[in-house]
Image: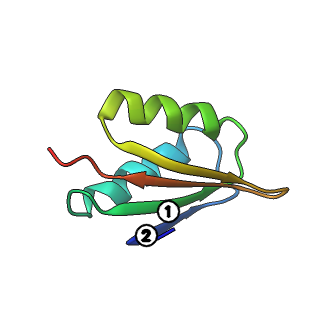
């Protein structure tokens, strides 16, 4: 998947992955895609709720044995 920026939040627990995501999105233009990597199992529900509340679009969630990778498209307005 194409992305414009990566944020590595591995080893961080809630709420730090969300805070890093917010900071990453603030530095991006509308419709750009942020890739964020997290090892916190709670981040799955956290990022789903974050996208619903903020209007950003969760494009894809990939999961392997060590991490969760989210692709979030910044809202256009």
Q: Quadrant of residue 10?
A: bottom right
Q: Nearer the viewer, residue 6 or 23?
A: 6
46 relative to 62 in the view: left or right: left
Instruction: Report x, y in % for residue 12.
Output: 64, 51
Instruction: Report x, y in % for residue 25.
Output: 32, 56
Instruction: Report x, y in % for residue 17.
Output: 54, 48
Q: Is residue 3 above or below residue 9?
A: below
Number of residues whose C-alpha sits closer than 10 Å to that of mark 1, classed few (under 14), some (14–19) or many (20 or more): many
Q: Nearer the viewer, residue 15 or 63?
A: 63
Residue furthest left in the image:
77
Number of residues whose C-alpha sits closer than 10 Å to that of mark 2, classed few (under 14), some (14–19) or many (20 or more): few
Instruction: Report x, y in % for residue 11.
Output: 70, 56
Q: Is residue 40 above or below residue 25?
A: above
Q: How is the rendered protein coloured?
A: rainbow
- For the C terminus, the image quarter is top left
SS for callout 2: loop
The reply to whether discs 2 and 1 touch (Cβ–Cβ < 8 Å) is yes
Q: Is residue 9 above or below residue 17?
A: below
69 relative to 56 in the view: left or right: right
SS for callout 1: strand
Q: Which mark is residue 1?
A: none
Which residue: 30% across, 35% down?
Answer: 55
Which residue: 49% across, 62% down?
Answer: 35
> Counting residues from the N terminus, which is met first, the one under dot 2 or under dot 1?
2
63 relative to 28 in the view: left or right: right
Q: Which mark is residue 35?
A: 1
**Mark-to-mark CA distance, 2 and 1:** 6 Å
Which residue: 67% across, 35% down?
Answer: 42
What residue is shown with label 2? 3
26 relative to 21 in the view: left or right: left
Q: Nearer the viewer, residue 17 or 64?
A: 64
């Amino acid at each position: 998947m194409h992305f414009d920026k990566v944020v590595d939040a591995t080893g961080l627990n809630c709420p730090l992955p969300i805070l890093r995501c917010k900071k990453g999105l603030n530095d991006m233009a509308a419709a750009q895609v942020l890739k964020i990597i997290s090892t916190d199992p709670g981040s799955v529900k956290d990022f789903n709720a974050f996208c619903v509340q903020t209007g950003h679009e969760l494009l894809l969630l990939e999961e392997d044995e060590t991490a969760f990778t989210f692709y979030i498209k910044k809202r256009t307005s």
